[in-house]
Amino acid sequence: MAAYVNDLTMDAAIGYVMLRGTRINICTTAPTSYAEATSTYMLAQSATALTSTDFTLAAGAVDGRKCTIPATSALSVATSGTSAFVAVTGSSGSTLLLYAPCTTQALVTGNTVSTTAFDWTIRDATT
């Protein structure tokens, strides 16, 4: 028997991120908490706050639903290190909302870094 989850259910989960995601953080390691994403492993952070209109909700490339996290430009590098992950954090409740691997790159304090847009997808239910 096939499994089913209504798109509205997936949209609610994605909407949670869209409404609460306020910053893009470049990290050296996969963060497991807000503190790690915004301090311990953080190399750079977006200076201006994201709003829900910065994110795009759409059908997934294969199935399900996806959220496109916007590209960012000229993030000031606060700490030298090698980028490995990009995280989305929310200032409301100090929450780590999601992270994804990114292109590794040596970053140097005082320089800037940009990110490309990336997708977060919730796939359709399967059995």
Image: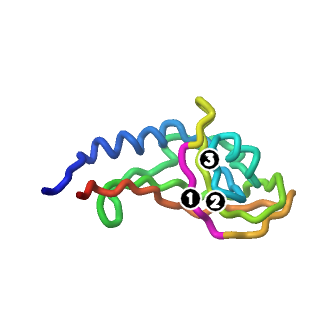
- Foreground mark, 1 or 3, reads 3
Q: Does 55 sit left or right of 46 as displayed?
A: left
| Amino acid type shown at disc 1 | Ala
- Nearer the observer, 127 or 4: 127
Q: Which residue was labeled with disc 2?
A: 85
Q: CA distance from mark 3 to mark 2?
A: 12 Å
**Crowdedness near tag 2: few (<14), some (14–19) or many (≥20) residues, C-alpha within 10 Å:** many
Residue sitting at x 49%, y 41%: 52
> Of helix, strand and loop, which one carries label 3?
loop
Find out whether the residues at labels 1 and 2 contact each other: C-beta distance under 8 Å. Answer: yes
| Amino acid type shown at disc 3 | Thr
Say which label, 1 or 2, has the lower sequence index. 2
Residue sitting at x 64%, y 69%: 103
Say which label, 3 or 2, has the lower sequence index. 3
Count of marks placed on residues: 3
| Amino acid type shown at disc 2 | Phe
Quadrant of the rendering where the N terminus is positioned: bottom left
> Of helix, strand and loop, which one carries label 2?
strand
Which image quadrant for residue 83? Answer: bottom right
Report the disc number at residue 32. 3
The picture places residue 24, in percent across and down from the top left corner, at: 63, 49
Main SS of the magenta part reads strand
**Crowdedness near tag 1: few (<14), some (14–19) or many (≥20) residues, C-alpha within 10 Å:** some
| Region rendered in magenta | 97-103
Magenta includes 74? no
Q: CA distance from mark 1 to mark 3?
A: 12 Å
Q: CA distance from mark 1 to mark 2?
A: 6 Å
Residue sitting at x 20%, y 50%: 4
- Foreground mark, 3 or 2, reads 3
Q: Which residue was labeled with disc 1?
A: 100
